Image (tube, rainbow, N blue to C red):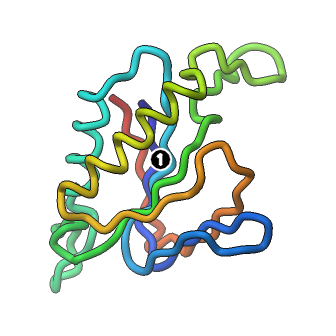
Amino acid sequence: MKTVIQRVSFASVTIDGNVVSRIARGILVLLGVEKGDDESKADWLAEKIANLRIFEDEAGKMNLSLRDVGGSLLVVSQFTLAGNCNKGRRPSFDTAAGPDEGQRLYDYFVETAGKLGVPVATGIFQADMQVHLVNDGPVTFILER
């Protein structure tokens, strides 16, 4: 599994001009599922993201987690994270999980994050989405498992 996470002060997902999800302070998670990924990888990533200390404390140091600040997650499926651009001019998606397995593990990740006590909003799997965000910092990390 691959994720790009961004600390945000606001993020939303729009489909066909309608806002389907939004969060205030929190983390936007772009989640890519690859062949061979399983629940243990989703468990690790959900726990890591919920507890990663990327929010500033009163001294201005990154010392607080999403759970510490009462923030939310916005999780968006991101098939293109499995893209390999090393050869040619067109990305190869050979390592991407199939749609059924991708959605199963995406849903599992969302459920797992929710069980950690984190409010979770989502995009819609396989939809054409517009993601709007205000990256706070900017703070962006890539996590893989």
User: Which residue is depicted at the point 45% across and 71% down?
Assistant: 8
Indicate the quadrant containing the C terminus: top left, top right, bottom left or bottom right: top left
Q: Specify whether 60 is left or right of 145.
A: left
Mark 1 — residue? 4
Using the rendered view, name the quadrant where residue 115 is placed. Answer: bottom left
Q: Position of residue 92 (x, y in %)?
A: 71, 18
Q: Give the crowd class for mark 1: few <14, some 14-19, many >=20 residues within 10 Å.
A: some
Q: Specify whether 90 is left or right of 19.
A: right
Q: Specify whether 120 is left or right of 63.
A: right
- Type of amino acid under label 1: Val
User: Which residue is depicted at the point 49% across and 59% down?
Assistant: 122
Residue 77 vs 85, above or below: the answer is below
Q: Could you tell me which secondary element the residue under label 1 belongs to? A: strand
Q: Position of residue 123 (x, y in %)?
A: 56, 57
User: Which residue is depicted at the point 37% across and 71% down?
Assistant: 26
Residue 127 vs 63, above or below: the answer is above
